[in-house]
Amino acid sequence: MENHYCAERGQESESADKTGCRTPHLTEDEVKAAFLRVVNFLITDRDEVLAELRAVRDTLSGTEKLEAEQKRLAEQMNTDADAVQSLIAENARVAQDQEAYSVRYDALASRFEDTKAKYEKVTADIAAKGIRRREFDRFIQAVEKLPDMVTEFDEALWGALVDHLTVHAKDNIVFTMTCGMEIKA
């Protein structure tokens, strides 16, 4: 008996009719055939696809502006930290109204924490763009290494190229590649 896959439940069953699943069912062979169509599309238009991928990668993974903002925020954090230390040292040396000192301290500490939160977000954004770039690079390398035609399903190739697929209908299968590109099979 042929196995069927239910997109809604993400599970395999022996018969599509027994699952109660409302989404279209595909057999493993149908999924493999759709994958081969997508891979061979990539091969047919390889130069154009690679040029587009490189352009998108460079646009999505550019970090120059973020790095400049990160540097500015680091400098602001240092300035704020120095101001807090100066205020503490002044309070230790000179008798002050402690209520006024607390207000000034809280304002400086709050500004430092706000800047620190922004710095951490920018740093995380830079890291995410780096990860995204590496995903694109791996996908580009996999496409570059493809032979002139793929005639048999290759599980390793699937893992290198496909993130997931969406079955809208038996004749409307969309592959989402590891780089985020969507290709209709």
Image: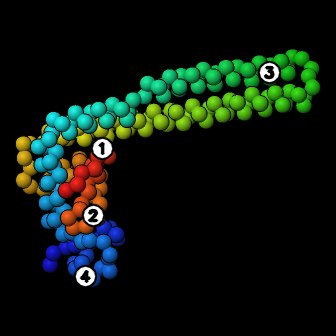
- Amino acid on which disc 1 is placed: Cys
Can you tell which quarter of the image residue 29 is in? Answer: bottom left
Pointer 4: residues within 10 angstroms few (<14), some, or many (20+)?
few
* Mark 4, secondary structure of its residue: helix
Q: Earlier in the sequence, mark 1 or mark 4?
A: 4
Checking the image for residue 17, the label placed there is 4
Work out whether mark 1 precedes mark 2 in sequence or the reverse, and give the earlier one.
Answer: 2
Circle 2 SS class: strand
Query: Answer yes or no: do the residues labelled 4 and 2 have beta carbons within 8 Å?
Result: no
Q: Which residue is mark 2?
A: 167
User: Disc 4 versus disc 2: distance between alpha carbons?
Assistant: 17 Å
Q: Amino acid at mark 3?
A: Leu
Q: Check disc 3 and report the residue beneath it.
A: 87
First along the sequence among labels 3 and 4: 4
In the shown orientation, is residue 136 left or right of residue 106? left
Specify the label residue 131 is tagged with.
none
Q: Amino acid at mark 4?
A: Asp
Name the residue tied to disc 1. 179
Precedes in sequence: disc 2 or disc 3: 3
Q: Which structural element holds mark 1?
A: loop
At label 2, the amino acid type is Val
Whether residue 162 is visible to the viewer of this picture, yes or no, is no
Q: Nearer the viewer, mark 4 or mark 2?
A: 2
Is 4 in front, or is 42?
Answer: 42
